[in-house]
Image (spheres, rainbow, N blue to C red):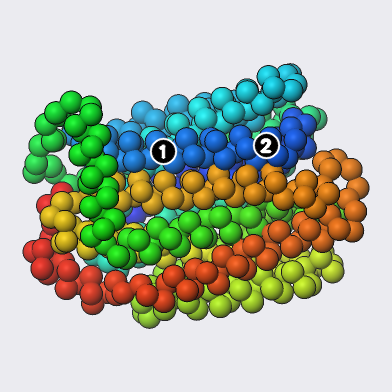
Amino acid sequence: MSTRRMRAGYGVGDFALNLHWNAIGMFLIFFYTDHLGLAPAAAGATFLVASVWDALLDPLAGTLADRTRSRWGRFRPYILVGGPVLALALPLAFTDPGLTGAALTAFVLASHMLLRTAYAFVSIPYAALSARIARDPDERSRLAGVRMLFGTAATIVSAVAIPTIAAQTPGADGWTIAAGMMGMLSILGFAACVVWTREPVEVDTPPVSRGWRTELVRELSAYAAMVRASPSLRRVIAIIMLTSVALTMFSKMILYFFKYVLMAEASAPLALFLLTGGAALAIPLWVWLSIRRGKRKAWMIASWAAAANFAGFYLLGSASFTLACIFLFLVGATTSAFAVLFWSMLPDTVEESELASGSRGEAKTFGLAIFAQKTALGINGLLVGLLLPAIGFVANRPQSAESVHGIVAIMTLIPLAGVVLGMAVMRGYGLSADAHAAIRARIGGTTAP
């Protein structure tokens, strides 16, 4: 199978996953508050519980995937079977059950947790797949770039299609239809990922089970040893937490910004298109820069640019529709670097951990990283739910001047703080291309699957 087809197969898998991820991250809280009538605090709390549940499942998904042996490999069976289940769970989460009060909150939580359960058992094996189909750090950067291009394409599709389709049918039903269409499209992407990628032939056998209690202690010890063994992994986990808490705040608040600050709710699809379009155009630049200048240097350059854009948006973004659109494009272009870079850094930590601990665990590494990302997303959802009432926000009503300023501050100053803290963490990142090459040489260049 050609390298080009392998990259495309891996990338289209991320396209499918991001149809779900963006529906959750961009629209779900807005759907809860403005279409189901759920209080922001309750919406944020359910988002936190579901996200933590999702995050807790990630290490389990990683452990099971690492132990799986089949003719399809370790990871692709989960994508093949779990993809359709995930596709069915998405429209359920965007359904109005016709309930109120505690019953509505219970339905929202249950449907969200079902969606996140399916997502965990597809996303972790998918993410770990990259460490098995590519061992060279530059190829991993290219693979991460391809993944981000497909993921950004999915973001554009979902950002434009979901609110546009939803607007065609009054009430919550339009959102259910839109989510169902995204789910059906994702099934095609998952199928292509399974067919167009190949995992290395297995040369070992799955570990022998010694009882669930013994295995639980063993697996928790393996996670702890992996984190202790790789200082680079600790830093990557930290920046994943920071960027996920801080930067997701921007995308979550865009619908509120256009509806309540600019009074241009119908232009929200255009705004989301500009944000993701800027990301799509800039991704090749960040891949090239990471290969040419190194991943840490590329991170610092992107951070300075992103910080300037968030500050500019805070000062000028609400002055006019045109300025808001310009800053949306620039924010998308600069912040796209972070996902490209931490997903290309993460596979490199697998070998660093293997050298120190003597064991290799791709799925565990990615499971831990996505555990951090999803926990951060839950914290982000809770913060949105708490901050909106704190600034005096009331859904579907004109907002006070304080609420308008609060919306702008939430979506810009929190991401700005996250970018600055991320720079401080990345200053000590030492797993350069040369350092990684030396590690690979010490463990024999090519490690066993």
Horizontally, is 263 left or right of 20 in the view? right
Image position, residue 119 (x, y; %): 45, 36
Q: CA distance from mark 1 to mark 2?
A: 20 Å
Does any portion of residue 154 appear in the rendered image?
no
Residue sitting nearer the eye, 121 or 214:
214
Image position, residue 419 (x, y; %): 55, 69
Secondary structure beneath label 2? helix
Crowding near pointer 2: few (<14 within 10 Å), some, many (20+)? many
Image position, residue 401 (x, y; %): 89, 58
Residue sitting nearer the eye, 57 or 317:
57
Mark 1 residue type: Leu
Residue at x 65%, y 73% (from the top left corner): 309
The picture quadrant where one finds residue 446 is bottom left
Q: Which residue is mark 2?
A: 43
Q: Which residue is mark 1?
A: 56
Sequence-wise, the earlier of marks 1 and 2 is: 2
Residue at x 48%, y 56% (from the top left corner): 241
Horizontally, is 340 left or right of 30 in the view? left
Horizontally, is 206 left or right of 329 in the view? left
Image position, residue 316 (x, y; %): 79, 72
In this rendering, the answer to whether 137 lies above or below 175 is below
Mark 2 residue type: Ala
